[in-house]
Image (cartoon, helix red, strand yellow):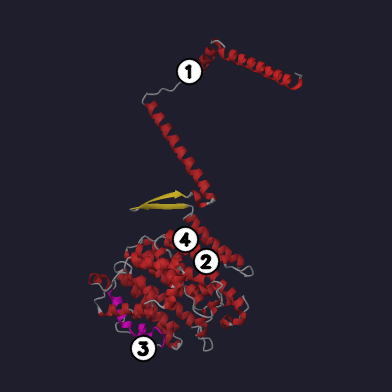
């Protein structure tokens, strides 16, 4: 049952209320993994897999919804993939686990995937149950197709090694290793999120639901993961500082006069902290065009939804956090009605691009003139706008039904390109018609229906025409002379009458 606050928000934003109603009425129901007809691919009839689905719901309720909507055995595979990586993440996040235990487990968890019954007890993290129930995860991993096992184990190995490298830099005074430069920040986010994107691309390709070469799109896959991770790191700044953790690179917050991340939540320095946050936003925005490029490569609808929904949520969250003082006081989230509207729009690359364009323009409007990154933020937002207009020009309208789409230029759009493209299309149409006529005439000549005249024949015909005109009576010339004389006489007569009436006495 929605809370009173949620209901009031929907009433304040009627367009979001409409989105919620449309979602309830028209959106397809989520895949029911508990349906016996789905047991073959969902594995819900096995106790260990039911445990894994419960763990997925527990550790990420919002993410579990999009996972369950993946087609066939891909949903079960991604569920296991997520839980394996969640186990790694739990080891990394739990600052109560000493490094002499944490580091070996991070580096060797991929080997535990082949060790029946292994689990870990002793974590005090909120997701400790994932480690405690790892035996069920391992059992279901062993039942996956080997083509999936290879991908999951490889990503687990790389991620664990990367997390261990960063965790090894921690000290008693600094439980979480400080990230000093933006390059270090990119590397850290690659280990914890970019590799997730690479692994998902590998699973999508292995399933046959996406093209085989998608797994080789490492840069685009990495950017999709980094966009989501950097958005979460930006949004969670207050929570992380309160917990004694910090993932913002020193290079960014030091540029705005802060010695540590604790200073970011100082109310007396709110302006500088918001400028540091805008710098973090700028860093996240540079991954947007890559994410949009990646989504244009997807062909499976459920896979596209799986990728697109978190992406539109990320860009909306960046907009909500931008220059928002609440960011420094609490965890900022987008409204439920807004989230539902985004889910409804995340169905094809064009609509997703328009969502990115909408929020990029919103961010651009909120850029402060005294923000040190004012120009770079404007350029970053303009790049998203340019990407969208290049791939899906807004002056074009798409209509159609039953799978047949038609594209037309909207003359009322007001876009200068509409006039140019209308001219180009008109010229192309005229050229096509001219070529068609010429082809028809050529065909008639080839069949002898029309015979071409030689230059000598054309010259002789023109000479005969001129001679005929010279020989004929010059009636036209005589008629012209007569008309001229009559016109002169009429003019003189009118002049005489006017003169008499105006200047001579009665």
Secondary structure category for the residue under label 1: helix
Name which of mark 3 and mark 2 comes first in the sequence.
3
Side (left or right) of 324 relative to 502:
left
- Asked if the magenta segment contains residue 127, the reply would be yes
Residue indicated by mark 4:
354
Secondary structure category for the residue under label 3: loop
Residue indicated by mark 3:
121
Q: Residue at x 60, y 78 (%)?
A: 270
Quadrant in the picture for residue 476: top right
Front of the two marks 1 and 4: 4
Numbered range of the magenta stretch = 124-143
Name which of mark 3 and mark 4 comes first in the sequence.
3
Name which of mark 1 and mark 2 comes first in the sequence.
2
Name which of mark 2 and mark 4 comes first in the sequence.
2
Front of the two marks 3 and 2: 2
Determine the CA span between mark 1 and mark 4. Answer: 64 Å
Determine the CA span between mark 2 and mark 4. Answer: 17 Å
Q: On screen, 230 above or below 455? A: below
Q: What x and y, as percent, mark residue 31?
A: 30, 69
Q: Residue at x 52, y 73 (%)?
A: 321
Is residue 221 in view from this perspective? no
Name which of mark 3 and mark 1 comes first in the sequence.
3
Name which of mark 1 and mark 4 comes first in the sequence.
4
Residue indicated by mark 1:
457
Residue indicated by mark 2:
286
Determine the CA span between mark 3 and mark 4. Answer: 47 Å
- Asked if the magenta segment contains residue 414, the reply would be no
């Amino acid at each position: 049952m929605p809370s009173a606050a949620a209901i009031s928000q929907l009433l304040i934003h009627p367009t979001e209320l409409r989105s919620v109603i449309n979602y309830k009425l028209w959106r397809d129901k989520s895949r029911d993994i508990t349906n016996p007809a789905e047991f073959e691919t969902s594995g819900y009839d096995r106790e260990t897999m039911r445990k894994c689905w419960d763990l997925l719901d527990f550790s990420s309720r919002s993410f579990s919804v999009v996972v369950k909507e993946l087609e066939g055995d891909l949903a079960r595979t991604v569920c296991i993939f997520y839980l394996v990586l969640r186990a790694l993440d739990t080891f990394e996040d739990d600052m109560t686990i000493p490094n002499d235990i944490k580091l070996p487990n991070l580096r060797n968890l991929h080997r535990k995937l082949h060790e029946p019954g292994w689990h870990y007890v002793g974590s005090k993290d909120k997701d400790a149950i994932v480690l405690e129930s790892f035996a069920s995860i391992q059992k279901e991993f062993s039942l996956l197709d080997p083509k999936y096992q290879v991908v999951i184990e490889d990503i687990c190995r790389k991620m664990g090694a990367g997390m261990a490298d960063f965790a090894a830099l921690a000290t008693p005074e600094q439980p979480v290793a400080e990230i000093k430069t933006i390059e270090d920040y990119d590397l850290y986010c690659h280990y914890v999120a970019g590799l997730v994107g690479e692994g998902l691309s590998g699973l999508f390709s292995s399933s046959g639901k996406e093209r085989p070469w998608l797994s080789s799109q490492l840069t685009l896959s990495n950017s999709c993961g980094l966009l989501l991770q950097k958005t979460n790191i930006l949004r969670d700044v207050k929570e992380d500082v309160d917990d004694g953790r910090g993932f913002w690179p020193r290079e960014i917050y030091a540029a705005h006069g802060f010695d540590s991340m604790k200073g970011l939540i100082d109310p007396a320095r709110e302006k500088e902290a918001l400028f540091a946050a805008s710098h973090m936003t700028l860093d996240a925005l540079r991954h947007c065009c890559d994410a949009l490029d990646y989504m244009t490569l997807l062909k499976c609808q459920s896979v596209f939804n799986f990728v697109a929904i978190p992406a539109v949520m990320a860009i909306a969250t960046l907009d909500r956090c931008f220059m928002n003082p609440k960011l420094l006081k609490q965890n900022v989230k987008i409204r439920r009605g807004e989230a539902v509207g985004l889910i409804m729009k995340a169905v094809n690359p064009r609509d997703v691009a328009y969502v990115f364009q909408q929020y990029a323009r919103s961010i651009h409007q909120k850029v402060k003139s005294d923000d040190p990154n004012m120009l770079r933020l404007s350029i970053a937002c303009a790049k998203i706008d340019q990407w969208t207009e290049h791939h899906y020009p807004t002056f074009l309208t798409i209509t159609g039904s039953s799978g047949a789409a038609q594209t037309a230029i909207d003359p009322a759009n007001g876009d200068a390109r509409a006039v140019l493209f209308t001219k180009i299309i008109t010229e192309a149409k005229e050229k096509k018609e001219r070529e068609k006529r010429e082809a028809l005439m050529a065909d008639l000549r080839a069949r002898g229906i029309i015979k071409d005249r030689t230059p000598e024949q054309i010259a002789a015909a023109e000479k005969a025409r001129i001679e005929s005109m010279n020989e004929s009576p010059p009636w036209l010339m005589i008629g012209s002379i007569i008309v001229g004389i009559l016109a002169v006489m009429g003019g003189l007569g009118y002049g005489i009458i006017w003169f008499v009436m105006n200047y001579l006495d009665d």
